[in-house]
Image (tube, grey):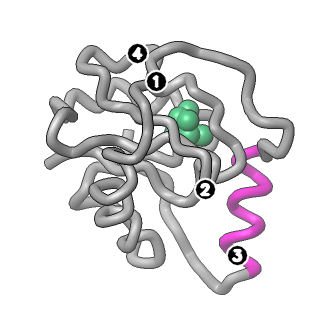
Amino acid sequence: MPHVVTERCVDCRYTDCCAVCPSDSFFEIASPAMLVIDPNVCMDCALCVPECPVLAIYGQDDVPEPYKEWIQKNVDLAPTGKVFNQKVDALATAISLDAIHEREKSRGWDISDPPS
Ligand code: F3S
């Protein structure tokens, strides 16, 4: 079960995740501005999950329903990006986990954070 980066990452791109990845699974893409995981490279170690400040990464079987489209998006987008494996500054548009929760609530979504 590979791990999946969800929409929570879009326009945040904190990059804490890729710095702990032992297999260079993360790829940077420009549109949308985020990192995604190549499921063919991910070793499923889950080290990245607690590192993300907005808890954007879920195991494939744990992806909440409103974010399920991101399973295929990671598959499709990873080959279009370039390997990214170091911590850099977050995007200027990055928001907090509280703000993410508020946005999800405003959409009528009741989303659990990834299990730790
Ligand atoms: Fe995105 Fe979180 Fe990594 S915001 S770049 S999945 S640390």
Which mark's residue is nearer the viewer, 1 or 3?
Answer: 1
Relative vertical location of residue 41 with respect to residue 9 in this rendering, above or below: above
Give whichever of discs 1 and 3 has the lower sequence position.
1
Relative vertical location of residue 10 with respect to residue 40 in this rendering, above or below: below
Is the residue under label 3 in contact with that under label 1 (CB below 8 Å)? no
Which residue is under mark 4?
20
Position of residue 33 measured from the top left corner of the image (x, y, whole percent)? 64, 48
Q: Which mark is residue 84?
A: 1
Most common SS among magenta residues: helix
Q: How many numbered circles does the render carry?
A: 4
Give whichever of discs 1 and 4 has the lower sequence position.
4
Which residue is under mark 2?
32
Q: Amino acid at mark 2?
A: Pro
Distance, label 2 to label 1, CA atoms, is 15 Å
Q: Amino acid at mark 1?
A: Phe
Which mark's residue is nearer the viewer, 3 or 4?
Answer: 4
Which residue is under mark 3?
105
Judge the density around disc 3: few (<14), some (14-19), many (≥20) Cα neighbours within 10 Å: few
Give whichever of discs 2 and 4 has the lower sequence position.
4
Residue at point 48%, 56% (across, down) = 6
Give whichever of discs 2 and 3 has the lower sequence position.
2
Is the residue under label 4 in contact with that under label 2 (CB below 8 Å)? no
Give the extent of the magenta segment. Answer: 96-106
Rendered-image quarter of ligand 1: top right
Residue at point 50%, 36% (across, down) = 28
Q: Which mark is residue 10?
A: none
Q: Secondary structure at mark 3?
A: helix
